Image (tube, helix red, strand yellow):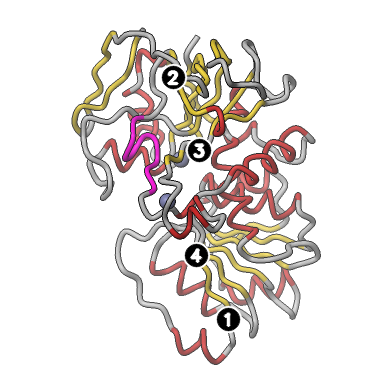
Amino acid sequence: MIQAVMTSPGVIEYRDIPRPLLSENEVLIEIKRIGICGSDIHVFHGLHPYTSYPIVQGHEVSGIVADLGPEVEHVAVGDKVTFTPQVTCGQCYPCLHGMYHICESLKVMGFQANGAAQELFAVDADTVLRIPDHISLDHAAMIEPISVAVHALSRGGDVEGKNVLVLGAGTIGNLVAQVAKALEARAVLITDIREYRLAKALQCGIDYAVNPTGQDLATAIRRDLGPDRADLILECVGAQATIDDAVANARKGTTVVVVGVFGQKPRVDLGLVQDRELSLVGTLMYQKRDYERAIELVAGGQLCLEPMITHHVRFTEYLSAYQTIEEANGKSMKVMVVLD
Ligand SMILES: [Zn+2]
Ligand SMILES: [Zn+2]
């Protein structure tokens, strides 16, 4: 079977490797879709600080169960599935206290452990979740980024009835905003400096979309969310300007969730955090329960995913995923690698 290996930044080699052997509690998945995200793009460019080469990419995945170890009971051959791409130690403080997603030795498939960019992939059965038949393979591969959004919102407390401000309308920002709506936020305002992304957000049903380079954000927040402004703010970019926007536009007592990954150390006005009694909280990835919630949301038709999947490329032309993203020049969202 064929495996796509990134041997160095920007270079993918196809290797013919033996079919994986299954241990007792493993599931063999025939991989069908692999979503490409911003972290993959960093790996492609050699800019991911915690990835070395060679590496097999692929962490936003859907597929069909091809075989089972003898102890596996919760899925069957032929089931549509996805899996959580985390490898954890099971022994550190977070692992022993229900927070394995922030394991001290966390390895993420596609970055510090090999991912699923191959025809058949064996994973621990505990990480595998069944996807209802009516969910498409494309949408099933979106469960991973949706789970990022579900977990991020859980870090901000109860969303129902709240005014939510989401800074950044890329895939994660868009999904955070959509999940906030699905969790019955009162109103959701999203920002981005790219009109393309704002148009996508509106197409996906987000209430308000604002380009802060074209209008004053503080004014827009009062206009769209009302005088009480935002109860919950999610920074989904990882840039100085957006963490500034988050803290500067927080009302007293607002919670700011830091979702974006910061390449450079930002300066944060901690004086405002103190004086306004802000809650500034981080969020990393997800747990299996976030996947379960994400699957429920998709199964219930509560998210609008179709406009977000902008391109498909073939597995045999993996590199063209990155070329497509570059050529789209900001006008792409989720690129799916397809295996038939
Ligand atoms: Zn991703
Ligand atoms: Zn651990």
Residue 105 magenta: no
Give the percent coordinates (x, y) of residue 266.
Answer: 35, 71
**In terms of secondary structure, where does tag 1 sit?**
loop
Q: Nearer the viewer, mark 4 or mark 3?
A: 4
Where's residue 283, x and y in %?
51, 59
Q: Which residue has dot 4 on it?
A: 282
Q: Residues within 10 Å of mark 4 (few under 14, many from 20)?
A: some
Identified at 58% across, 57% down, the residue is: 152
Return the mark for residue 213: none
Q: Residue 181 or 62: which is nearer the viewer?
A: 62
**Mark 2 or mark 4: whose residue is earlier in sequence:** 2
Q: Nearer the viewer, residue 94 or 146?
A: 94
What residue type is disc 3 on? Met
Q: In this figure, which residue is indicated by the disc labeled 2? A: 121
Q: Amino acid at mark 1?
A: Leu
The residue that mark 3 highlights is 333
Residue 278 tag number: 1
What's the magenta region? 106-114
